């Protein structure tokens, strides 16, 4: 399963990062993204919500059932071993974290699920890799720029980097050209206003723009 997910990330090059969207809205959003060419979705834990464990697990199960093989479904903002395990039990195909938590990485790795921890410095990157990370998320990339990815790729050219935090349809190509293999896109693509107002056709159109930008 790992190779399938890793290959999909590298070929699609984009993952939609979604927070606090559940139920029917999540289903409509997933279909809208797929129609626009983005078939990887990261449902993130909303850490300020005391019930985020149950809500996130439920939406992962819902999307897995609804989308089947049409979409890769993973979890984001997994800060603890418990959160990672709950997501994996719900069917998450990858686990993304904002930090380099070795215990979380080791758990995800031992479960045979794709591990994508967050890092910024070379030390954090290599700590994540040694713990079993399959890819490393560099974030927030907007604070560093595409040149930082190119600089990291100099000495650390054996690690696959995902970038998040400030990625949009205008700059995503720069990050990929600099050496990133993929990008996570949140509010610039998955607009809460559009979802609330049922403007899923506009999300599909945006997804198409991003898909064109990475080709």
Image: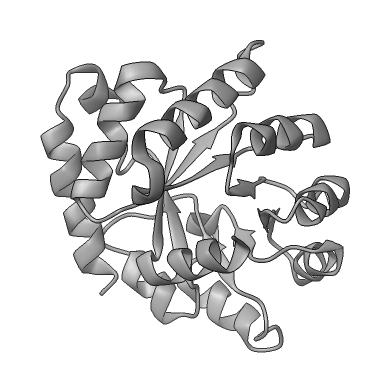
Q: Could you tell me which quadrant the C terminus lies in?
A: bottom left
Q: Is residue 15 left or right of residue 188?
A: right
Q: Residue at x 39, y 42 (%)?
A: 68
Q: Is residue 61 left or right of residue 29?
A: right
Q: Could you tell me which quadrant the N terminus lies in?
A: bottom right
Q: Is residue 121 left or right of residue 175?
A: right
Mark yes or no: residue 215 visible: yes
Would you place residue 150 above or below residue 171 in this image?
A: below
Image mark count: 0
Q: Residue at x 54, y 81 (%)?
A: 150
Q: Position of residue 71 (x, y in %)?
A: 38, 48
Residue sitting nearer the eye, 158 or 40: 40
Residue sitting nearer the eye, 207 or 71: 71
Q: Residue at x 82, y 36 (%)?
A: 81
Q: Position of residue 136 (x, y in %)?
A: 65, 63
Q: Residue at x 40, y 65 (%)?
A: 13
Q: Position of residue 152 (x, y in %)?
A: 64, 78
Mark yes or no: residue 48 visible: no
Would you place residue 1 above or below residue 76 in this image?
A: below
Q: Position of residue 206 (x, y in %)?
A: 19, 48
């Amino acid at each position: 399963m790992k190779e399938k997910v890793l290959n999909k990330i590298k070929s699609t090059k984009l993952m939609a990062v979604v927070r606090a969207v559940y139920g029917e809205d999540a289903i409509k959003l997933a279909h809208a993204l797929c129609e626009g060419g983005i078939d990887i979705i990261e449902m993130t834990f909303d850490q300020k919500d005391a019930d985020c464990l149950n809500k996130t697990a439920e939406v992962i199960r819902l999307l897995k059932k609804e989308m089947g093989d049409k979409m890769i479904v993973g979890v984001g903002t997994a800060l603890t071993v418990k959160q990672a395990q709950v997501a994996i039990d719900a069917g998450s195909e990858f686990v993304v974290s904002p930090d380099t938590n070795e215990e979380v990485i080791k758990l995800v790795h031992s479960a045979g699920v794709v591990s994508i921890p967050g890092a910024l410095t070379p030390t954090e990157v290599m700590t994540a890799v040694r713990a079993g990370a399959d890819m490393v998320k560099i974030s927030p990339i907007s604070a560093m720029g595409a040149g930082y990815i190119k600089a990291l790729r100099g000495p650390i050219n054996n690690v696959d980097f995902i970038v998040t935090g400030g990625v949009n349809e205008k700059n995503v190509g720069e990050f990929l050209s600099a050496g990133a293999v993929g990008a996570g896109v949140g509010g610039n693509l998955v607009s809460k206003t559009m979802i609330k107002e049922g403007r899923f056709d506009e999300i599909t159109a945006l997804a198409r723009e991003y898909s064109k930008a990475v080709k």
